[in-house]
Amino acid sequence: MQRKLTFLCNTDSVDQSAEAMPQPAPQAQNARQKFENRISDEGRFAAYARGRVGHFAARQVLTLLGALILWVLVSPQIGLLALALALLGEAVDCLTLWVLIKRRSFGRGARIVSTGTAAVQALSIAACVWIGWHATAGPEARFFAVAYLCGAIINASLVFPYNRRATEARLVIYILVIAVLFALDGLQGRGGRGQLVFDSLATLLLLYMAYSFVSFVLRSYTKRIKMEREMLEGQERLDRSYQTLRAREREARHLAMVAANANDSVIVTDRAGHIEYVNASFTRVTGYTVEEALGRTPAELLNGPNTDTEAIEAILNARRTHEPVRLELINRTKFGKDIWVETNITPMMDSDGNVVGEVAIERDITQAKQREQELAAAKTAAEEGARAKAQFLAMISHEIRTPLNGIIGMSDVMLSGPLDPEHRGNLQTILASGEGLLTIINDILDLSKLEAGKMEIDQLPFDLRAELQAALDLVRPLANEKGLSLSVDVSGLPEGRILGDPGRVRQVFLNLMGNAIKFTRAGAVSLRAAVDTGAAPPRVTLAVQDTGIGIPADRLDQIFDAFAQADSATTRDFGGTGLGLAISRQLTQQMGGDITVTSVPGKGSCFTMEFVTGLDVMQPVEVSPRICADDEADLPASLRLLIADDNRTNRLLLAKLLSPLKDGMRFAKDGVEAVEAFAADVPDLILMDMSMPRCDGLEATRRIRALEASRCTNAPVPIIALTANAFASDRERCLAAGMDGFLTKPIRRNDLLRTIARATRDSAIAPDNAAQPPPRHSAAV
Ligand code: ADP
């Protein structure tokens, strides 16, 4: 029985896939829950208790009948006694159950109590049977006992599925009482041997009857529960299917709504590519009505002469491979207008994975495309503008440098000769003004390069101490002139070279040093240089301190802006353009550092330049004595020079600058003349202007190198570019054409003599003033 009962709580039969399915509706879930509660131990016991209490009256029919029989068979007193006993037993049982119901107490303890009260109730019935048995000795007593107990057994068995222990207690008592009564009869020898056999058989029959009836009740109950469970499960399945159906229907409705109201065109085609559905946006964008579209292919309707064939090919390819595809292409509307669309085509599959059609979602991107094209045009225009600006600057720079070459060069020439003091002073003013103008041009070129992001910072090994020393040599005369003391502390610099851009470091340092001297009327300017080798990468710090006019706190930030000065009187009192610090800061930032400033008005300022570097400790420092141009200015009188320049002033200037070589100089007015002059008589050195009519300096150089190659010349003639083009790219073009050096105009006498002297001494000429930009404060040199 225990085994059979276990199915009641068996959850194996519950559909395990239910989790993956939609949850049944709450009603179905409630019903299921109620059912599970009902068939639980507590649920069944509750039903038992309620049934016993509820059917109390009906059960008393049997009690009354028994009492009546005893009344008639024995005596009214015995009948009443039996009735009282039976009612007492029932009362104990039912009252207990009633209390348990009231307390809603259906747990294990309650069940044990109910087993006890069931036993009490069964004992009261047993007592009635015992009394009837002994009150009359006739066969009717036997009949009464068996019949009465049969009724009680049936009654007890009916509730077996609900309270097994109570039923078992009752059945044991009923069977025992009859067995004991029969046994006692047998012992007393009543009825003889035949009676004993008969009694034994009757007891067994009763036992069998009890067993069969309990089995029958249990089977019926089990069957009913099983059916009920199946019914509930069926209900749940139905419920789930219904929910799924509802969800799908809702989804389909939403999708239909989305498709119908989408801003994008939606096109659904069948397996053969014919349109089955289009939404309202399709009509709005393409002009084709639903009726016009149905049954046609999208290609028939929308491809035009401007539709990209590659895009069509990509769509066909995706269709062949059943892949989704997303691309942009031109569609032609019903009214012949070309529009740009972004299309997303996805194959639709049935449950077996067979393609049943396609869905295409198309977005009109004509406006976005137009904007894209406008933006591209604007970008091209901006780039064009930047290029034009750069060209303009290069051109202006070139054009200004050419006359400056005359002004500065001629001043140089005249200053090197005898002059009375007044003329010398005037000439020095002309020279200083020319060089001031040159500084401005250089600054503007630098600024435009920095702003265009075209400024390149070299990473070369160089000796920072030597570089600083050279720069200090340039500014020392100025400091001396103003009576300022110049102190230098480079003890924090390592022995050996560092990596960086020596020209740009010198440019920034000279700017800071030049400013410090310029804005200090009395006192001192000091430099402290150090490298923090502990930092990774190492950092160089150059701190330039002065005891000058200082800068108000509210101007400290602005002075780094282009064309900004601390106050409007600065230009009047000290000169300058306000470009130097803007350029210096940007250059330093490109070197991975920055310039910072602290200042106290009236007391002085400290500008600190910090930049990252690498250490080139592997290579020993090359001890290259600084060339003093005047030391090397003695050119061999026999030197034969070929000078190619289309500008008369430049030719005149060069003739004057190189007057000691007068007889050895030949001039060419353009590249063609230069090549002819070279072919006629190979000179010791050529000074070659870059821009010349007929054939420019680059082409002339290439032809000369070609001639040398055809003549198998062992020592090619050194060619030095003389040019007003100051860009590094110009220098590279010159070197690529076969030149050996590069001098930018305006040409300074010392630079020129030094370069020629080195070139003639050493055929491998190192360009001199080209590697580094001219110093901004060269006027002070
Ligand atoms: P410039 O010197 O040509 O005016 P800069 O950009 O080099 O341009 O400097 C901008 C301004 O910063 C200067 O005009 C000056 O007002 C202020 N300044 C720079 N250095 C110093 C300094 N050492 N002492 C005081 N003021 C300075």
Image (tube, rainbow, N blue to C red):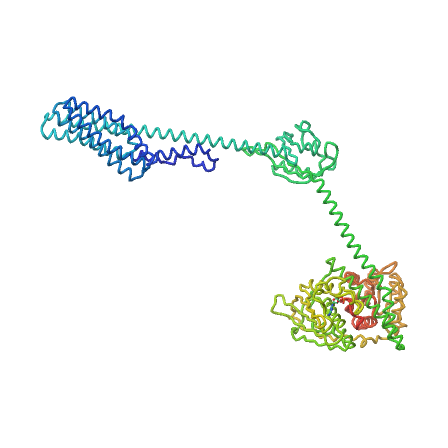
Q: Quadrant of the N terminus?
A: top left
| Residue in front for this viewpoint, 508 or 720 | 508
| Residue in front for this viewpoint, 703 or 730 | 730
Whether residue 127 appears in this view of the structure is: yes
Whether residue 719 appears in this view of the structure is: no
Residue shown at 77% from the left, 54% from the top: 386
Residue shown at 74% from the left, 50% from the top: 379
Q: Give the residue at the far top of this rendering.
A: 72
Horizontal side of 489 relative to 721 (left or right) equals: left
The answer to which quarter of the image holds residue 19 is top left
Indicate whether 12 appears above or below 634.
Answer: above
Residue shown at 24% from the left, 31% from the top: 90
Indicate whether 623 appears above or below 678.
Answer: below
| Residue in front for this viewpoint, 687 or 399 | 399
Horizontal side of 33 relative to 336 (left or right) equals: left
Q: Position of residue 621 (x, y in %)?
A: 68, 73
Q: Position of residue 605 (x, y in %)?
A: 70, 70
